[in-house]
Image (cartoon, helix red, strand yellow):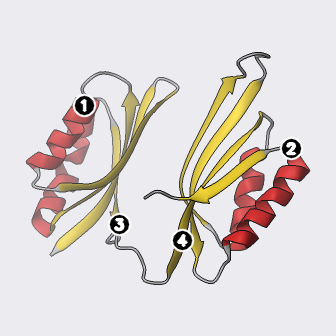
Amino acid sequence: MKRYRLLLASGADRSGIVHAVSQYVYQHSCNVEDSRMAVLGGRFAMMMLFSGKDKDVERFETELEDFGRQAGLSAVVSPADCPEEPATAGPVVRMEVVAMDAPGILVQIAAALKELGVSIQSLDAHLAPAPTSGTTISSVKIKLAVPAGVEISKVEDEMERLAAQINLDIVIRPSQE
């Protein structure tokens, strides 16, 4: 039977980490289903959904601590569900937010989306200096799953209200995925 697991791994950034992890997955006859990787604050961080047969996943989990130690990574595995999309899912949209950096922007956006029942599927947030003024600008790109029965116009209206309230520029558009 095919099993799904989520691997979370992090460690000091260096060349060869992705090779080491992907080789470990391959050597255990498992398959990478989906992954996200980034370097944040000089640290490599990874989330990887993988699958394999019961015996291969069991061996993967049993040997992971030794692999992590050898690779210089902190690694944990958790059970995961089959990644198939539910039949009742609504549209997926992209939202981009730009604002002068201030504490609480992300929590207010997340709260408004929660109230609408919208799920955040991915989120990338970055701070950078504005080209001319040097003011710190917050840039957030979010992939949203809008539940069936919730109009995108309702999401747009709520985000526009929030944008006006806390001085954000927000653009919502259909996802190209």
Residue under label 2: 167
Q: Is residue 115 above or below residue 97?
A: below
Mark 1 and mark 4: span between their CA atoms? 40 Å
Residue type at mark 1 is Ala
Instruction: Tell me the quarter of the image containing the C terminus.
Output: bottom left
Q: Mark 1 vs mark 4: which is more N-terminal? A: 1
Q: Residue at x 59, y 76 (%)?
A: 147
- Nearer the camera: disc 1 or disc 4: 4
Of labels 3 and 1, earlier in sequence is 1
Along the line of sight, the residue nearer the viewer: 121 or 160: 160
Secondary structure under the numbered disc 1 in the rendered image: helix
Horizontal side of residue 174 vs 5, given as left or right: right
Of pointers 3 and 4, the one earlier in the residue sequence? 3
Q: Position of residue 144 (x, y in %)?
A: 57, 61
Q: Nearer the viewer, mark 2 or mark 3?
A: 2
Q: At 66% from the left edge and 56% from the top edge, which residue is drawn?
A: 172
Q: CA distance from mark 1 to mark 2?
A: 45 Å
Helix, strand or loop status at disc 2: loop
User: Which residue matches tag 3?
Assistant: 80
Q: How far is the residue under mark 2 from the one under mark 3? A: 38 Å
Q: Amino acid at mark 2?
A: Asn
Residue 33 at what x, y percent from top left?
27, 57
